[in-house]
Image (cartoon, helix red, strand yellow):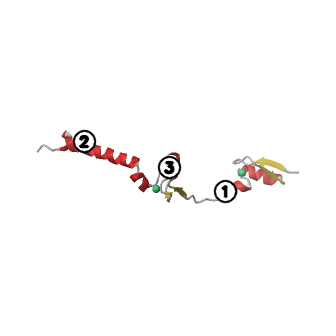
Amino acid sequence: MSFIRKCPKCDKEIIYKNKKILKTAIKNNKLCASCSRKKEKVIEILTRICPECNNQFTYKSKGAYEKAIKFNKMCRSCTANSLEGKKIRSENAKKYSKLRNGKTNYKII
Ligand SMILES: [Zn+2]
Ligand SMILES: [Zn+2]
């Protein structure tokens, strides 16, 4: 006699030969062998290849990594050299020149 239980994570059927083991598994919400193996902490290395210069670079946060994939971001140096980087620079320059020319850029003593 065997008992079948589904893995709560992957829905794979787990066969138990013993009702006692089955009960313990239900109680502890046990995962199947492959899922419990996967549970061991995997150190994620978030690396991407820059689409522009083909250099490999790493990300410190998963959020930044996913965002980079989504927008097909280039590495930092390529971004700085790209149109986008130039745009940001010129926007900053505009901002500063506005400040320089603006009325707020002087003090009345
Ligand atoms: Zn599983
Ligand atoms: Zn690059």
**1 sits to left or right of 51:** right
Q: CA distance from mark 2 to mark 1?
A: 56 Å
Could you tell whether 31 is left or right of 59 in the image? right
In the figure, is residue 68 to the left or right of 86?
right
Residue placed most toward the observer, 30 or 53:
53
Distance from disc 3 to disc 1, alpha carbons, whole Å, reads 26 Å
Q: Residue 98 shows which numbered tag? A: 2
Callout 1: CB less than 8 Å from ligand 1 = no
Three-letter amino acid code at the position of disc 3: Ala
Give the distance between the C-alpha atoms of the residues marked 3 and 2, in whole angstroms: 32 Å
Q: Which of the two labelled residues, at mark 2 and mark 1, occupies the earlier sequence position? A: 1
SS assignment at label 1: helix
Where is residue 96 shown, x and y percent of the image? 26, 46
According to the picture, the residue beneath numbered tag 1 turns out to be 38
Q: Residues within 10 Å of mark 1 (few under 14, many from 20)?
A: few
Tell me the residue at 28%/43% (across/down): 95
For the point 49% across and 56% down, the residue is 60
Q: Quadrant of the C terminus?
A: top left
- Report the front residue among 86 and 99: 86
In the picture, the disc for residue 108 is none
Helix, strand or loop for disc 3: helix
Q: Return the x and y of residue 84 as percentages of the image width and height.
A: 40, 47
Whether the residue under disc 3 has CB within 8 Å of ligand 2: no
Q: Which mark is residue 68?
A: 3
